[in-house]
Image (tube, helix red, strand yellow):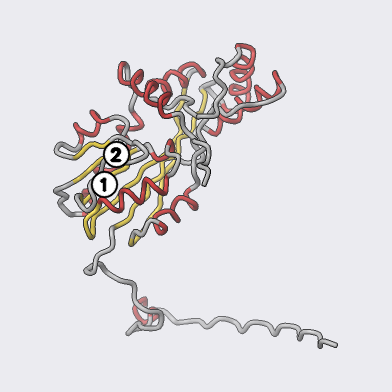
Amino acid sequence: MPQPPALTDRAALERFRTRAHRDPALFLHEDVADEVQERLAEVNRTFTAPAVVTGFPQLWADRMPGARIVADTPVLDLEAGAHDLVVHALALHWADDPLGQIIQCRRALKPDGLFIGVMFGGQSLHELRAVLAQAEADVIGGLSPRVVPMGEIRDLGALLQRAGFALPVADGFTRRVLYPNLMRLVQDLRAMGEVNALAARHRAPLRRDVLAHAVELYHQQFADAEGRLVATVETLFLTGWAPSDDQQKPLRPGSAAARLADALGTVETGLEPAPFAAPRPAKD
């Protein structure tokens, strides 16, 4: 069976990450690491065999000493059933097969082990995508892929169930980052290795007239009252537990021993009867 075309140029992605290591701006990765640690504290459980899948190993080695640090390669270097926690940290949006990555993490977990996957969501950099597409269309009459496509939370949450996780939860948050100009935004993207590594990208540099028009459009459409450019970052969290016999199970419908209205001290109001449907016409 023919393989689908690759989404990501892995060699280019590694070059861009290596360049980012020289002068990093990893504030989004640091925010995610802080959020993961806060969520783990709320779980109120000690994890003794964690693993982290990441493109920036030093950051996570500092945050989670003793964790196994794993590169986000197509085949993850994870041993089956070896970990009670696996964090996939801001790399799933570059995966050609996100479901395959999640399944590999699921297999690496012990029963009742926890998976936390973090990735950028579909609203991320929608301003930059819009102005680049419009600028190319206006100047050269076409467009090329410039920003990696990112998933929507309603679709990504379903991947947890497909991967076999129990108690799946998908949530996230959106923040706005303000920049004095478009060049500062591009510099930050380079300093965190998030520039265009799409396999189908146009290899030639962006034309100066296209870039100038994109700058003009960005200021017209997405600047705040003080002239600062708004860049949206949506961060999504996928959380699930490896199935275990001693996990809590949902009750069967109709098996409740008490009425909710009694517990809330309120009066139950019945639903209005549904209107009668019009009779179907008789067949000849």
**Residue displayed at 44% across by 82% down:** 267
Badge 2, how many Cα within 10 Å: few under 14, some, many 20+? many
Residue 227 lies, in percent from the top left, at 54, 21
Read off the residue under disc 1.
Answer: 86
Read off the residue under disc 2.
Answer: 53
Measured along the vertical axis of the image, is residue 80 above or below residue 228? below
**Residue displayed at 52% across by 83% down:** 270
Taking the image as drawn, is residue 149 in sight? yes
Q: Quadrant of residue 174?
A: top left
Residue 36 lies, in percent from the top left, at 28, 43
Residue 259 lies, in percent from the top left, at 37, 83
Kind of residue at badge 2: Val
Q: Residue 210 — which label? A: none
Determine whether the residue tagged by mark 1 lies in a helix, strand or loop: strand
* Cα distance in 3D space between marks 2 and 1: 8 Å
Are the two marked residues, 2 and 1, in contact with CB atoms closer than 8 angstroms?
yes
Kind of residue at badge 1: Val
